[in-house]
Image (cartoon, rainbow, N blue to C red):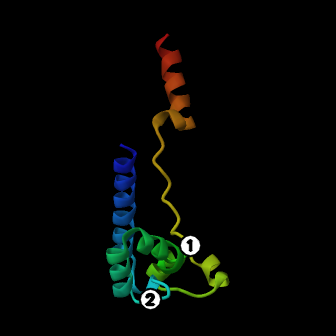
C-alpha cells in the first residue's frame, strides 16, 4: 500500500512539473530552451522535475514581468503595478444617507 501511495505521489509530481514546463512562457524559462526542459522532465520523470523546479522554472515574479513586457532589474519591478481596482458597489445599509432617510420614514409612520 505505501508503494502505491508513493507511486501516485511521484506521478502527480511528474504531471505537475510537465504541465508547468509546457505552460511557462518561452522567454521566462531559465538555463535551457523550453523544448529541452520538456524532454528532460518527460524522460527523466522525478529527477527531471526536481531539475526543472531548481534550475529551469522562472523565479517568482519573473513570469509576471515577462508577461508585462518588462524584464529589468528590481527598480523597474517597483514601477510595474496592477491597475487600481474599481470600488465595489455598496449595499444600502452601508449608505448613511439611505439610513437617515429610512429612519425618517419610520418615524413619520409611527
Identify the residue at image location x=53%, y=65%.
Answer: 84
Q: Which residue is mark 1?
A: 81
34 and 76: which one is in front? Answer: 34
* Residue 109 picture location, percent across and down: 46, 14
Determine which of the numbered discs, if any, sits on residue 19 in the image: none
Q: Residues within 10 Å of mark 1 (few under 14, many from 20)?
A: few
Q: Is residue 58 left or right of residue 1?
A: right
* Residue 49 picture location, percent across and down: 43, 71
110 and 44: which one is in front? Answer: 44
Whole-Å distance between the Cαs marked 2 and 1?
29 Å
Q: Is residue 87 above or below residue 50?
A: above
- N-term mark: 2 or 1: 2
Q: Contact (CB < 8 A) between labels 2 and 1?
A: no
| Helix, strand or loop under label 2 | loop
Identify the residue at image location x=42%, y=75%.
Answer: 48
Q: Residues within 10 Å of mark 2 (few under 14, many from 20)?
A: few
Q: Which residue is mark 2?
A: 32
* Residue 5 picture location, percent across and down: 37, 48
Q: Quadrant of residue 36?
A: bottom left
| Helix, strand or loop under label 1 | loop
Q: Is residue 33 above or below residue 19?
A: below
Q: Residue furthest right?
A: 75
* Residue 78 picture location, percent across and down: 64, 77
18 and 67: which one is in front? Answer: 18
Identify the residue at image location x=54%, y=86%.
Answer: 71
Q: Is residue 56 above or below residue 107?
A: below
Identify the residue at image location x=50%, y=77%.
Answer: 58
Closer to the eye: label 2 or 1? 2
60 and 45: which one is in front? Answer: 45
Q: Residue furthest top?
A: 110
Amino acid at each position: 500500500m505505501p508503494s502505491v501511495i508513493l507511486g501516485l505521489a511521484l506521478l502527480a509530481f511528474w504531471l505537475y512539473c510537465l504541465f508547468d514546463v509546457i505552460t511557462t512562457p518561452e522567454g521566462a524559462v531559465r538555463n535551457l530552451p523550453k523544448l529541452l526542459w520538456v524532454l528532460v522532465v518527460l524522460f527523466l520523470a522525478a529527477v527531471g522535475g526536481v531539475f526543472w523546479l531548481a534550475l529551469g522554472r522562472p523565479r517568482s515574479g519573473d513570469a509576471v514581468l515577462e508577461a508585462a513586457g518588462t524584464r529589468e532589474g528590481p527598480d523597474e519591478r517597483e514601477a510595474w503595478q496592477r491597475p487600481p481596482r474599481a470600488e465595489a458597489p455598496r449595499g444600502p445599509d452601508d449608505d448613511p444617507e439611505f439610513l437617515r432617510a429610512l429612519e425618517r420614514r419610520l418615524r413619520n409612520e409611527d
